[in-house]
Image: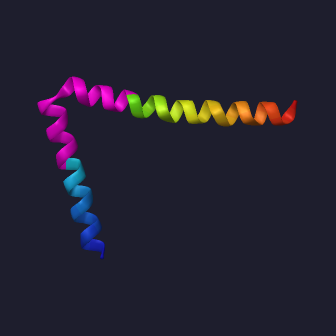
Amino acid sequence: MKWVKRILITAVVVFALFYMVSRPEDAAAAVQGAFDAVWGAIASVGTFFTSLVS
């Protein structure tokens, strides 16, 4: 099963590199969207704990 994981990771990396080279604006937008989603989740957890304390 270890080789399956290695093949999948390699395929994802190759696809990401291909996507970044062929469509850099779309790749940048996808990364920005991912960071925005993570930041939004962190902010929501912070708001939850702030509301819990008060």
Q: Is residue 48 left or right of residue 4?
A: right
Decide: is 52 above or below 4.
above
Please give the name of the residue rendered at 39% of the width and 29% of the height, measured from the top-left corner.
33
Quarter of the rendering occupied by the C terminus: top right
Q: Is residue 24 left or right of residue 41?
A: left
Q: How many marks?
A: 0
Decide: is 7 above or below 52.
below
Residue reaching furthest top? 25
On whether residue 36 falls in the magenta region, the answer is: no
In the depicted view, which residue is nearer to us: 10 or 40? 40
Please give the name of the residue rendered at 18% of the width and 46% of the height, measured from the top-left corner.
15
Residue reaching furthest right? 54
User: Residue 39's x, y, as percent?
Assistant: 53, 30
User: Residue 43's x, y, as percent?
Assistant: 62, 30
Decide: is 12 above or below 36.
below
Give, as a single range, the part of the protein colored magenta: 14-32
Residue reaching furthest left? 22
User: Residue 16's x, y, as percent?
Assistant: 22, 42
On whether residue 16 falls in the magenta region, the answer is: yes
Please give the name of the residue rendered at 22% of the width and 23% of the height, measured from the top-left corner.
25
Please give the name of the residue rendered at 80% of the width and 31% of the height, measured from the top-left corner.
51
- By secondary structure, the bulk of the magenta-drawn segment is best described as helix
Q: Quadrant of residue 31?
A: top left
User: Residue 8's x, y, as percent?
Assistant: 25, 60
In this picture the colour scheme is rainbow
Quarter of the rendering occupied by the N terminus: bottom left
Residue reaching furthest bottom? 1
